[in-house]
Amino acid sequence: METSLRCFTNHISALRGLKQLNRALEAYSTSYFLTKDTSRSYDEYKAAVTDITRLMTREQLAEYIVSVLNDYELKGLIQPPREQNVSDNEKREAMFCHIREWHREGHKSQRDYCTFVAKLALKPMSTKLAYLQRACMYKEALCFKQVVMDAQAAIKQCGSKNGTTDSISSGDEHSEDGMAKTILANPGTPNPFEKRTFLPRAWGWFLQGLGFKVSRNTMF
């Protein structure tokens, strides 16, 4: 059966017309992984999924990420939450709040999470980044004991590669090893905005510390 991008064009166009962008993104992802030579078609698919994610609302971005995290749990790629948990609706609301806060602290553009989700549709997220994303979600859901557990799980998987510490390629700010966002630079600098990269180990330590601090302050 033909599995190229053309086979999904009509189906995806219909989903876009119905504003069902999450399903359109899933259709692109399915088509991509069925393609025999993904290396030759990556640029074509990247442009297509990026076009989709730029149209997605924060609610839709949040729903897509939560569905991926749930899938990781079902497949045993990450451990299910053991300390605290909330309903799927609360998860989507919490992830939405995280994305909104992420963008609020940086530039007004939603490009950071749009780019992240676009890449997520074509390349599986690493387990350490999955734990970090889930920790951010549980932070907004006020499940701070689970935040600590997920942050610790991410830190354990942040071992060095080839004798070097965690880093991301300068040409790929949205790689699985880290995320970058545009933030306001110091006043008086030539460029009013700058890119700041969040590496997984530092991100994990921050979330773990936050979870410990809040958990202690809310103990009865």
Image (spheres, grey):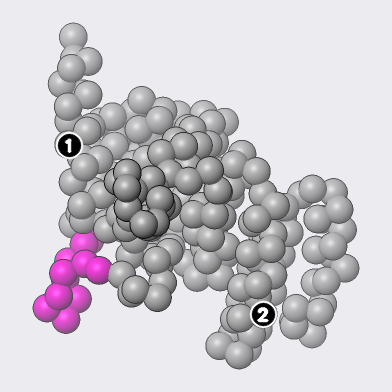
Residue, disc 2: 44
Query: Which amino acid type corresponds to the residue marked 1 in the rendered image?
Result: Gly
Identify which residue, 60 or 77, lies in the foreground.
60
Q: Secondary structure at mark 1?
A: helix
Identify which residue, 52 or 153, lies in the foreground.
52
| Residue 185 seen from this side | yes
Q: Is residue 92 above or below residue 48?
A: above
Question: Hey, which quadrant is residue 57 in on the image?
Answer: top right
The N terminus lies in quadrant: bottom right
Percent across and percent down for residue 176 are 38, 65
Q: Is residue 16 above or below residue 47?
A: above
Indicate left or right for 96 with 14 as reference.
left
Q: Is residue 93 above or below residue 126?
A: above
Q: Secondary structure at mark 2?
A: helix
In magenta, the rendered stretch is 157-167
Question: Hey, which quadrant is residue 122 in on the image?
Answer: bottom right
Q: Is residue 161 magenta?
A: yes
What number is the disc on residue 209? Answer: 1
Q: Is residue 58 magenta?
A: no
Percent across and percent down for residue 58 are 59, 41
The C terminus lies in quadrant: top left
